[in-house]
């Protein structure tokens, strides 16, 4: 599955695709946010219905189908309309990305609930690290393949082929997970009579649980790295000469960072040090942002993307594990949804980044990112294992 989604990684290829059809920095930020932020509010709805379900794999399979079809359709749209209708192409890409991200809002609740039932919190982080490690191997190959396709075909056809090929590879991973044997959930809470009552109870939980509140705020600010991430590749294109092969290598560098870092993340998480994972990841991102300011050659960008890959997987593992640790079993979907919905606003940091680049410059963007990352690091002192 990672092999597929790497093709439109919001740090590299997606900004290049949007930039090909439009020169607007704000639009680049908007599409980067759309790929990840379409799930806002959806997860609370999913949690409302999921809380009383003993099994969730059937619903997850429907999510997988929606994500495959939307991803495949984006490739078809680019090939058919990309050459002559850039505005229409961008609009339809946006629709496809929204469906892909929107369906993920439901899928995240179902997936994490299944993972929580299959693994104890002691082994969950280690298992997730192994999963991300082997996903990284596949993503590295995907980066090499992406570079080859970008070199072999001219845009926009090359972009369309990337989506179509990656959707087929993604389908393999989706089918594999759809065949797992899901344990039955034993502790089923009484479902609220209405969604309004569910929201009221959810907000009460957020107010009363200080651990949840601290974690949500820290996670939200941790997303600030996304403010500059989609624009690094565009800044690099202005500073140095990079083609399809170089872009593919940057993707691979990012995935190598993600893959190798999971060896460390897994050991730390297994030892109950998820908080340390978050803090190390933030320090890495602060370092990479400083490097971005002074980057003057291709080797700098290889290091920057390597660090970004490592830190991103650290966040994914640690915050995903921390929420399952502090959440009571019967309220687990609600806790997951609360964290996901509130922190999802951080997924719109790329839009803020686009505005900063449009009105000022890349330097101001990187400085703003640094300030927010330092605030995030300070906030992690309140995280509880």
Image (cartoon, grey):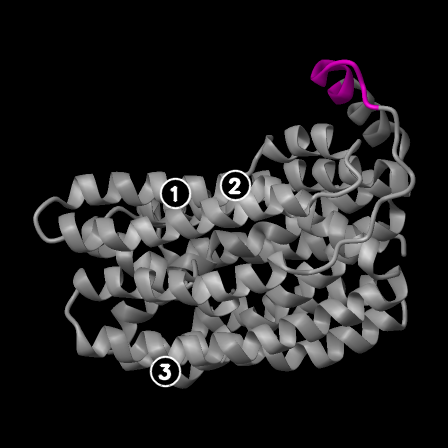
Quickly name the residue at label 2: 103
Question: Of the residues under marks 3 and 2, which one precedes in the sequence?
Answer: 2
Residue 197 magenta-highlighted:
yes
Label 1: which secondary element? helix
Instruction: Using the image, tell me which numbered label, if any, was put on residue 298.
Output: 3
Label 2: which secondary element? helix
Q: Distance between the residues labelled 2 and 1?
A: 18 Å
Magenta segment boundaries in residue numbering: 191-199
Q: Residues within 10 Å of mark 2 (few under 14, many from 20)?
A: many
**Viewer-proximal residue, 369 or 280?**
280
Q: Is any atom of residue 369 visible in this view?
A: yes
Q: Distance between the residues labelled 3 and 2?
A: 37 Å
Look at the picture and state if 47 lies above or below 328.
above
Question: Of the residues under marks 1 and 3, which one precedes in the sequence?
Answer: 1
Location of residue 107 in the rendering, given as x and y in whole percent from the top left corner:
61, 45
Quickly name the residue at label 1: 30
Picture quarter with the C terminus: bottom right
């Amino acid at each position: 599955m990672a092999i597929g989604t790497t093709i439109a990684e919001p740090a590299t290829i997606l900004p290049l695709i949007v930039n090909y059809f439009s020169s607007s920095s704000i639009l680049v930020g908007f599409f980067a946010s759309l790929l990840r932020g379409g799930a806002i509010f959806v997860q609370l709805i999913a949690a409302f219905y999921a809380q009383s379900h003993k099994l969730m794999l059937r619903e997850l399979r429907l999510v997988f189908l929606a994500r495959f079809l939307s991803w495949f359709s984006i490739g078809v749209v680019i090939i058919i309309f990309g050459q002559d209708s850039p505005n229409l192409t961008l609009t339809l890409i946006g629709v496809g990305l929204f469906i892909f991200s929107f369906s993920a809002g439901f899928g995240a609740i179902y997936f994490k609930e299944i993972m929580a039932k299959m693994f104890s919190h002691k082994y969950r982080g280690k298992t997730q690290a192994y999963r991300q490690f082997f996903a990284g191997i596949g993503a590295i190959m995907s980066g090499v393949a992406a570079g080859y396709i970008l070199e072999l075909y001219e845009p926009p056809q090359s972009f369309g082929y990337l989506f179509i090929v990656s959707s087929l590879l993604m389908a393999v991973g989706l089918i594999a997970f759809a065949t797992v044997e899901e344990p039955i959930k034993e502790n089923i809470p009484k479902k609220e009579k209405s969604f309004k009552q569910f929201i009221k109870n959810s907000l009460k939980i957020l107010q009363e649980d200080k651990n949840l509140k601290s974690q949500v705020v820290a996670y939200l600010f941790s997303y600030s790295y996304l403010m500059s991430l989609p624009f690094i590749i565009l800044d690099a294109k202005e500073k140095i000469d990079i083609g399809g092969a170089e872009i593919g290598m940057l993707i691979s560098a990012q995935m190598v960072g993600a893959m190798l870092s999971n060896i460390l993340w897994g050991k730390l998480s297994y030892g109950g040090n998820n908080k340390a994972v978050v803090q190390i990841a933030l320090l890495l991102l602060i370092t990479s942002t400083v490097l971005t300011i002074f980057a003057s050659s291709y080797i700098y960008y290889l290091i920057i993307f390597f660090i970004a890959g490592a830190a991103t997987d650290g966040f994914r593992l640690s915050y995903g594990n921390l929420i399952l640790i502090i959440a009571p079993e019967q309220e687990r979907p609600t806790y997951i949804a609360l964290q996901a919905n509130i922190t999802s606003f951080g997924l719109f940091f790329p839009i803020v980044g686009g505005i900063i680049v449009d009105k000022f410059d890349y330097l101001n963007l990187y400085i703003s990112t640094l300030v927010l990352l330092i605030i995030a690091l300070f906030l992690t002192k309140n995280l509880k294992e």
